[in-house]
Image: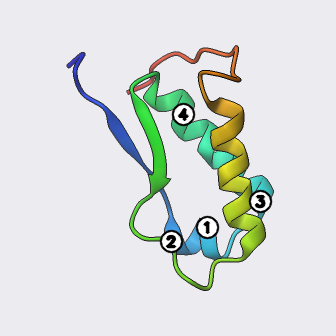
Amino acid sequence: GRDQVLHGNLDPVGLLMNGRPEGILSEAARCRRDAGEAFFLGAGCEIPVQTPERNVLALSEFVRMDSPATSTIRHGCGI
């Protein structure tokens, strides 16, 4: 319903730990597009300690770029 918020759901090992920053940005954008406005981005579980710093920074970069204060893009809801 309208009061529901989705949290999701980046693969913590396959994407965040073993992926590349470009893939993280792409998958984060897809999650955001599919979920719509009531959404906050996160790993499907905890982020492994072995995750490269560049990948954590890519995730942080996406969140900063997509925040309401800096984003002028509004996405439709696909879910």
Label 4 element class: helix
Label 2 element class: loop
Q: Where does residue 71 sit, x and y in percent of width and height?
A: 69, 21
Label 3 element class: helix
Quarter of the picture containing the N terminus is top left
Q: Amino acid at mark 1?
A: Leu
For image coordinates 61% across by 45% down, the residue present is 28
Which label is found at residue 42?
none
In contact (CB < 8 Å): disc 1 and disc 2: yes
Please tell me which of labels 1 and 2 falls first in the chain. 1
Please tell me which of labels 2 and 3 falls first in the chain. 3
Q: Is residue 35 above or below residue 11?
A: above
Query: Circle 4 sits on which residue?
Result: 32
Q: Amino acid at mark 3?
A: Pro
Which label is found at residue 47?
2
Please tell me which of labels 4 and 1 falls first in the chain. 1
**Label 1: how many residues lie within 10 Å, few (<14), some (14-19) or many (20+)?**
many
Q: CA distance from mark 4 to mark 1?
A: 16 Å
**Label 3: how many residues lie within 10 Å, few (<14), some (14-19) or many (20+)?**
many
Label 1 element class: helix
